[in-house]
Amino acid sequence: MYYVVTIATLVTMALALTRAFLGPSIYDRVLAANMFGTKTVLLLSVIAFLYGRPDFLDLALAYALINFIGVLAVLEFIRLRAQSEQTDRSDGGL
Amino acid sequence: MTTLFGVFMLTLLVITALAIVRTSHLFAAVILTSIFSLLMAANFFLLDAADVALTEAAIGAGISTVLFLGALALTAEHERVTTVKRLLPLSVVTVTTLIMIYATFDKPRFGDPEAPVHQHVAPWYLEKTPEYIDIPNVVTAVLGSFRGYDTFGEVFVVFTAGIGVMFLFSARPGNRKNSQRQATAEPGQGLRHYLVPRVVGRLLIPFILLFGLYVQFHGEYGPGGGFQAGAIVAAAIILYALLEGETQALRALPLSALTVLMAGGALLFGGVGIAGMLLGSNFLDYSVLAADPIAGQHLGLLLIEAGVGITVTGVLLSVFHAFAARGRV
Amino acid sequence: MTMTLLVDIASWILLSLGGVLIFTGGLGALRMPNLYTRMHAASLADTMGAMLVIAGIMLQAGASLATLKLAAILLFLLLTGPAASNALASAALLAGVRPDQATDSTAEDSK
């Protein structure tokens, strides 16, 4: 019963990975990584039930939280990078 | 069907690794590395190794990405591509790979009960854990009690890494550009302008901390333990630092407290070991810590896991603050 | 006997629908022309697909600790997914990534 959704999730992970390779801008890659994280959470939940090990759901919960923190860290980094480049430019390339 | 899933994941892993190596845009490489960690953790999960999967997820996908980005903020964004002919290293690597592939032809079948790795200590651990330690998670029993010395060494390795990073980062950058930049810019203010993530993030932080505590104490009954819990608690505080700014996070948990955490966890672990000696038995023997040997084992495991979690939290946060202070615009 | 059959059929339908939605989201993220359209496809389909899949699994789990953990996972996904998409879109907009403006043919005709 779980095979349909497992295969769909695996294929979507491959699609997200392709977007992470291709994405011309930074934000495409971050979007792909975020999508990959949520797909991993779903895959873990489904496979935990597929194998009859419901006590492995702690992993899915941990991933869901870590994924969010990762995305926010990346966005903060991009913002700091842009800010430092702007300061460089306003300093006259000092 | 499992092998199909495993093969598919491993193929994605190889493709991601190739992409990481081939790209020269370092930021894309960091994002792909976090995807690599997630894939690796999913692979561990498929192989039924839940503790390792949880540790890989918490540390690899979360903390490592943040630290790599912090390091990337201090360096250039593109790798300098050299066009040197690399025939000798390529041939060495190819020959070694072929030898290794040839060596895998002699490996036992996956999951073979007659394999050598399942013959000597593994059945002994599986039999004796209910008798000596009586907890459901054999991994924690092996890690904490049967192989306590190794975990003791690991905690001190983490501690050494922490103080090593702090030594490296305590050197002042003597750059005129850096000092001017620090004079004109404002201190780290975090994602102040983004209202929605800020509200949701602040709502989540207590629950992440609670989940970290759950993972810490649940390590004896399911996947979990000190390393994972330390990484999750550190991730919660890093989230706070990202949302509210690094200065606020330092006000909440100052660097002196982090140093105390770093050293205190390792001391706690060593203290439990010495307590075992003082009570008449060997170093790191938990059976003498209480009247009943099994209760003593439980108490010992609780204390050393707490020590591990405290040290890992302290080290990860110190390293994060060291990077953030250095790269502060 | 029929109760378990009904529960099985319901969870099968939910899981399959969820799978289809997830795949659609992935396809949209790959084939859409612009960053914002990709974000739209990915985040909407993600959230709804996750809701359906986890609801399907919860039906299978019955009344146990696993259902509570699944409810917690669903709650966190519902909270953090849209927040992350919002953060991403705000960051992209503030950094200057422009969405593709469609030309309005009626405005040109009335000129």
Image: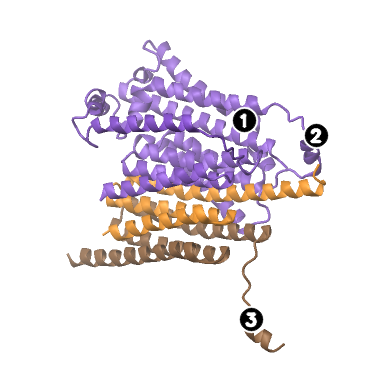
Chain colours: A orange, B purple, C brown
Q: Is residue B101 above or below residue B7?
A: above
Residue B230's disc number = none
Q: Is residue A30 above or below residue B165?
A: below
Residue B176's disc number = 2
User: How many other residues sit within 10 Å of disc 3, few (<14), some (14-19) or many (≥20)?
Assistant: few
Residue identified by numbered label 1? B257
Circle 2: residue type: Arg
- The image quarter in which residue B285 lies: top left
Q: Quadrant of the N terminus of chain C?
A: bottom left
Q: Residue at x 50, y 37 (%)?
A: B231
How far apart are labels 1 and 2 at the CA level?
A: 31 Å
| Left or right of A15 on screen, residue B5 | left
Q: Nearer the viewer, residue B88 or B211?
A: B88
Q: Secondary structure at mark 3?
A: loop
Residue identified by numbered label 3? C104
Q: Residue at x 81, y 41 (%)?
A: A94
